[in-house]
Image (tube, grey):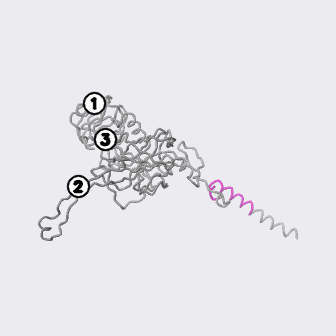
Amino acid sequence: MRMRAFPTLIFIARFAIIGLAAAFVLSLIAPTWIARLRGEPATASVSTRSGATSVRSGPASYAEAVERASPAVVNIYANKISTAGSYYRIRDPLTQRLLGLVPGPIMKRREQSLGSGVIFSADGYVLTNNHVINGADDIQILLDDGRTAQAQVVGSDAETDLAVLRIHADHLPAIVVPDNATAEVGDVVLAIGNPVGLGKTVTMGIVSATGRQLKMSAYEDFIQTDAAINAGNSGGALIDSLGELIGINTAIYPRTPTADGRGAYTQGAEGIGFAIPVTTAKAVLDQIVKHGRVIRGWIGADYTDIPPASGATARQQGVLIMRVSPESPAAQANLQPGDLLLKLDGSAIVDQIDLRNREAAFAPGTKVRVEGLRGNLPFSADLVLVQRPAPSTTGA
């Protein structure tokens, strides 16, 4: 009887050893499968930017991030008086046909624009979008704790669609701004604001793209996200999973610029929202607080990216000058339409965004050197930058 059982034990032991070996191999090549079989939460092995391998897992809740950032996000109610003509309709059909509508008195009405804002400092500086408060004569801010405060406009910048307000209240919470506030495609983000007047609302998504251009203004470097952004979210916070500010929500797609700079929204696209990077927003706020406006350097030329050569797969770095403003630094340095600018102060010019941001960062009066090609021949020129004029005079 024992001799008959011995082969059976050997058979069972052999398959047990094979099973253990297979489990060991699976634990090396597919650890998430083993975790799922055990009923444990799966973690993913990812490569960090330095090349090392680490294990990351997303949180089950972002409540702590929202709790950290939400008190610094406020609702903005901007009121203004608008005027419109009125007309009398004549009841007599014959007279109506002869005279048409007869002009009546000018009617006034109060309009209210809804938006959001972010408290940047405990002394009451609030950042929002310029189109939220543009033309308003009365701006009320509703704080997270239910208090209301009257806001004054410190300054605005139409070219980035940002405005700085000031309120006076005690114990104001300030948003947390990281030292290295960079957004990368795939990062989880949360949008906090006051959509369509519903009140404080949080939506979640990821960073879909960075460096987006909508051609609404001269200075654009938008973060694109699929976190829901609706009318009223403008000026609100786009935060990361730690509750730190990475952007100011500002637009949805598509948006067509209008004469007043606010833009007309068109239905048809969902999950495409845009935010101004916090680095841009912080730089604008600092200048407005210090000077009351944003002061930018200007070379005095309009330019665009260099068109790719026929059959080329990559676009050439640099910019192509399209127009030179009369009596500008570019005109005085004899820059001409058709010139290719390749370097600014010895550093390569990547594209028009790069050059526009770099020239704007220089203070007026700074001397810079540009290098490029004119008719396939190299040239260089020195320019002394001046302050960038208002958008209406630059064609931007």
Q: Which x, y percent locates residue 66?
A: 53, 50
Mark 1 and mark 3 lie on one chain; the one further toward the N terminus is: 3
Identified by mark 3, the residue type is Val
Where does residue 308 sit, x and y in percent of width and height? 31, 47
* Image position, residue 272 (x, y; %): 41, 56
**How many labels sit on residues?**
3
Is the residue 161 above or below the residue 36 in the image? above
Q: CA distance from mark 3 to mark 2?
A: 50 Å
- Residue farthest right in this picture: 1
User: Which of the two residues, 134 or 341, is positioned nearer the viewer here?
Assistant: 134
Q: Secondary structure at mark 3?
A: strand
Q: What's the distance in space between the residues labelled 1 and 3, CA to CA?
A: 15 Å
Asked if residue 311 is among those painted magenta in the image, a careful observer would answer no
In-front residue for pair 289/238: 289
Mark toward the start of the polypeptide (3 vs 2): 2
Q: Residue at x 55, y 47 (%)?
A: 47
Structural distance between the alpha carbons of marks 1 and 2: 57 Å
SS class, disc 1 = strand
394 on left or right of 18: left
Q: Which residues are magenta?
A: 15-33
Label 1 sits on residue: 381
Residue 5: image quadrant is: bottom right
- The numbered mark, 1 or 2, whose residue comes first in the sequence reads 2
Which secondary structure type mostly characterizes the magenta part of the structure?
helix
Residue located at (70% from left, 57% from top):
21
User: Which mark is on residue 106?
Assistant: 2
Does 55 sit above or below residue 33?
above
